[in-house]
Image (cartoon, rainbow, N blue to C red):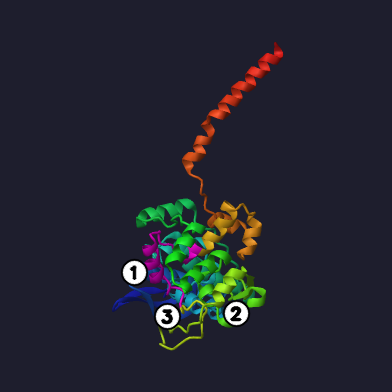
């Protein structure tokens, strides 16, 4: 008989056969669908029937499931954690049946209170990577996913009751100077280093004494976001400031063991937070986290305040595409009212009148 469902304990089970053109092609089944609702059980039956029919018609290879593709993917611990709920939801689906729209629809189902940026980063991106990795290795279907539209982001933000893209305030030289007046030497050097080099906090706190080349004013920063280890040039003053710091061995919070010596003394990329909040409070300046103080401040300082062309600034900050920092990191600093006032300045009107009078005189 065709696959049917029945309830056993908390979950619905399936029994019977998968049929094609009136004859059984897979089974017999007597297994849990892992669904606690009848609707979920029927969805499982439909997916299983589709998988077995496709396997029967076109063979086994094109019928690889998402779970099969997971076994081919070398995921980092962080990505593996993100993939667990995705596998539980679509693990039995054949790769050919998974569409971009389906992956995007997992967002509200798995993380109903998250923003669309989180859905894209923690659901769509890892799932797409698994599918396309299988495509490269075994020839299974490739997938392309269209980004969430602005209207989708706004609708989800309205549902959550909070905006997802809050404008960040970048640091400027005045903020840096005030911060450093009230900071200890380690935190003063740390914020200056990130503001000068656009290094991320994880890269900055990972710098060890052997990563410094004083004679050449070079600092090695670790690989991150598609970039390998890199030696970056710093100012002589920055190098002197870093050399003056006795290296510290921070303690690993998980194991309790001492780590290797670090130039700035921190062992984790979040360890600076409470200290920076105290410094900002004493200085009477708004609190800025490491990213707007460093990377955002770096690009805005060069492009907006000093007029450096975006391509040069992007290369100095190790962005491969200058359009990315222009879209995300460059913060306009001209007041909107000042922009509007430019259309109604007196001198423009006076010049226009004068021009008309002069033309009239020439004709006479």
Residue at which label 3 appears: 29
Q: Is residue 204 above or below residue 101?
A: below
Residue at which label 1 appears: 38
Residue nearer the viewer, 110 or 226: 226
N-terminal of the two: label 2 or label 1?
1
> Which residue is rendered at x = 48% and y = 44% of the image?
335
As measured in the structure, the alpha-carbon distance from the residue carrying label 3 to the one carrying label 2 is 61 Å
Residue 31 is situated, as x and y percent measured from the top left of the image, at: 39, 81
Residue 254 magenta: no
Residue nearer the viewer, 325 or 117: 325
Query: What SS does tag 2 mark?
Result: helix
Residue 315 is situated, as x and y percent measured from the top left of the image, at: 65, 63
**Do we see residue 320 in this rendering?**
no
Q: Residues within 10 Å of mark 1 (few under 14, many from 20)?
A: some
Query: What SS does tag 1 mark?
Result: helix
- Over which residues does the magenta segment extend? 268-293
């Amino acid at each position: 008989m065709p696959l049917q469902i029945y309830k056993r304990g908390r979950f619905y089970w399936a029994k019977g056969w998968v049929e094609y053109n009136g004859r059984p092609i897979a089974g017999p089944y007597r297994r849990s669908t892992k669904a606690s609702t009848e609707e979920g059980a029927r969805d499982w039956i439909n997916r299983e029937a589709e998988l077995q029919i496709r396997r029967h018609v076109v063979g086994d290879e094109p019928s690889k499931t998402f779970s099969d593709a997971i076994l081919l993917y070398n995921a980092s611990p962080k990505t593996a954690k993100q993939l667990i709920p995705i596998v539980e939801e679509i693990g039995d689906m054949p790769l050919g049946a998974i569409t971009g729209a389906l992956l995007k629809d997992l967002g509200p189902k798995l993380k109903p209170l998250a923003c669309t940026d989180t859905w894209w980063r923690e659901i769509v991106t890892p799932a797409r990577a698994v599918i396309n990795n299988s495509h490269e290795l075994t020839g299974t279907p490739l997938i392309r996913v269209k980004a969430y539209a602005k209207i989708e982001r706004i609708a989800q933000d309205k549902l959550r009751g909070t905006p997802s893209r809050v404008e960040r305030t970048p640091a400027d030289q005045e903020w840096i100077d005030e911060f450093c007046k009230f900071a200890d030497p380690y935190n003063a050097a740390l914020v200056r280093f990130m503001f000068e080099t656009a290094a991320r906090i994880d890269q900055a706190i990972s710098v060890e004494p052997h990563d410094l080349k004083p004679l050449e004013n070079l600092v090695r920063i670790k690989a991150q976001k598609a970039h390998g280890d890199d030696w970056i040039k710093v100012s002589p003053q920055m190098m002197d400031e870093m050399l003056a710091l006795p290296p510290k061995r921070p303690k690993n919070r998980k194991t309790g063991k001492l780590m290797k010596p670090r130039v700035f003394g921190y062992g984790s990329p979040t360890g600076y937070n409470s200290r920076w909040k105290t410094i900002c409070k004493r200085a009477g300046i708004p609190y800025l986290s490491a990213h707007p103080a460093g990377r955002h401040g770096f690009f805005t300082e060069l492009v907006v305040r000093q007029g450096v062309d975006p391509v040069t600034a992007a290369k100095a900050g190790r962005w491969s595409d200058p359009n990315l920092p222009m879209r995300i990191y460059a913060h306009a600093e001209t007041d909107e009212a000042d922009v509007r006032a430019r259309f109604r300045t007196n001198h423009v009107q006076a010049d226009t009148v004068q021009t008309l009078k002069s033309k009239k005189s020439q004709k006479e």
